[in-house]
Amino acid sequence: MELVERAGAGDQVAFRSLYDRNVDRIYRLMHRMAGEEDLAMDYTQEAFVRAYQRLDQFRGDAAFSTWLHSIAVSVALNGLRKVDRHRKRERSLGDAGPLASPTRRPDPGVRERLDEAVDGLPDIYRVVFLMHDLEGYSHGEIASFLGVAEGTSKARLSRARSKLRDALGPAMKEYV
Amino acid sequence: MTPTKDDRPAWIQAVEGYNRAGAVPRDEMWRGIVARIAAEEDHGEGVDDLARARARKRKQVSASGRRGLGLAVAAAAALVLGVGVGRMTAPTDTAPVAASTADVTAPRSGGLDLATREHLGRSGSLLTLVRADARDGRMDPAVAEWADGLLAQTRLLLDRRDGISPDTRELLLDLELVLAQVVGAAGPTPSGTEQADTETALTLTSLEEGRLLPRIEAALPHGAAGA
């Protein structure tokens, strides 16, 4: 809390210290969510900028890291919605003409199918899956970041896993 | 932290590489954060150096039309905060060097003590070279180390609590910024790239708009500056 107060009072070294303590986890999560370095950097920076601008609103009820994560996740989810809309527009333009290939894509390997299945999860499930199963956050942390009950986090993870298993279909046999 | 690696089903472990990040670009992102904050015109009670960054930004925006100005402003903002942090976090065990160099009993010229005069003279020599190169759109990498040494000395002089008039302090602050820009422009960025060109142009802008060399010349006894 002392660092936050100092940063809020204009102490640049304190703000840099807060940055150093949190940036690795935030960036890794942003990268998991965005899948692109540029977007991950953009969301990470935006999260810290917003946090800096709202330091006076931080009351210390939760850890600074928790508060910062909630900002970052919100930034990423909003940003990805915009990116997704843009990509969908691009895809629809690309598919509109006669260039759509008549040939079938080769059947992807299991890893690729897994990746595609994760990509295809609705955001509310995907983010919980990424945070819990890939980045190691606890359900308590995830619940704090997302502003939901811990049970909701657990339910969403269960749902995400279930959807992934369904998407893998027969390929699941390789893992049982 | 990573929980339950052993508890996770094998198929989840197989997706471990999904969107996994590489090395964290800490410094690059930090520069971007500082630039964004500085670019916010209406942020609240900013820290001193961010406030200075904002003032610099406005000053440089007035010189619109220069190539790559947007990037230059961002770079300047990042640089100014870096300057501030650099001074705040500079090792203090070197401070006595400046104190010993500054002979407080030396005859003064224009309100400057010997150490400050010598320092400004050396800085003037460097900046004369830099200005000539920058006008040709290049920056000699060899000056980076030279500028870095002068930058450290500038900070030590600025940290002194006595013997510096407000005018001299202002001159040293502007010198500090330009030297930091020289270090960046002559540093590891490959020459000929857009970033290197922008940094060189920015350095020249600060040097000329701030009339740094004429001010150094004016502060020194005749013939003492390298300009």
Image (cartoon, coloured by chain):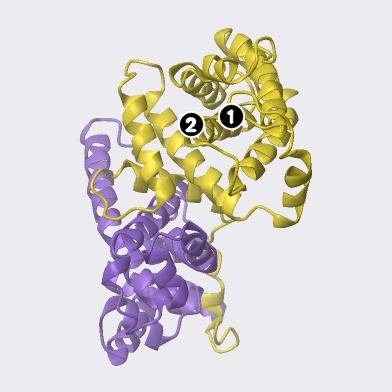
Chain colours: A purple, B yellow
Whether residue A173 is visible? yes
Where is residue B56? Give x, y as percent: 38, 33
Front residue of A136/B154: it is B154
Name which residue type carries label 1: Gly
Q: Residue B221 appears at what percent x and percent y?
A: 65, 16
Q: Are marks 2 and 1 in contact (CB under 8 Å)?
A: yes
Q: Quadrant of the C terminus of chain B?
A: top right
Using the rendered image of the protein, determine whether residue A103 is visible from the camera's viewpoint. Answer: no
Q: Residue at x 46, y 62 (%)?
A: A15
- What residue sits right under mark 1 in the picture? B111
Vertical placement of residue B131 versus B106, above or below? above
Side of A18 relative to B38 (left or right): right
Q: Which residue is mark 2?
A: B167
Element type where label 1 sits in the image: loop
Circle 2: residue type: Asp
Same subunit under labels 2 and 1?
A: yes
C-alpha gap between disc 2 and disc 1: 10 Å
Residue A50 screen position, x and y as percent: 31, 59
Residue A111 vs A162, above or below: the answer is above
Q: Residues within 10 Å of mark 2 (few under 14, many from 20)?
A: few
Mark 1 or mark 2, which is nearer the start of the sequence?
Answer: 1
**Of the pair B49 and B14, the residue shown nearer to us:** B49
Residue at 58 percent of width and 49 percent of height? B161
Query: Left or right of B145: which side holds B132?
Result: left
Please state the horizontal and vertical placement of residue B29, each as a whole percent of the image: 49, 49
Q: Chain of mark 1?
A: B
Chain under numbered label 2: B
The quarter of the picture where residue B132 lies is top right
The mark lying in front, picked from 2 and 1, is: 1
Split into 4 quadrants, where in the image is the N terminus of chain B? bottom right
Q: What kind of element bears circle 2?
A: helix
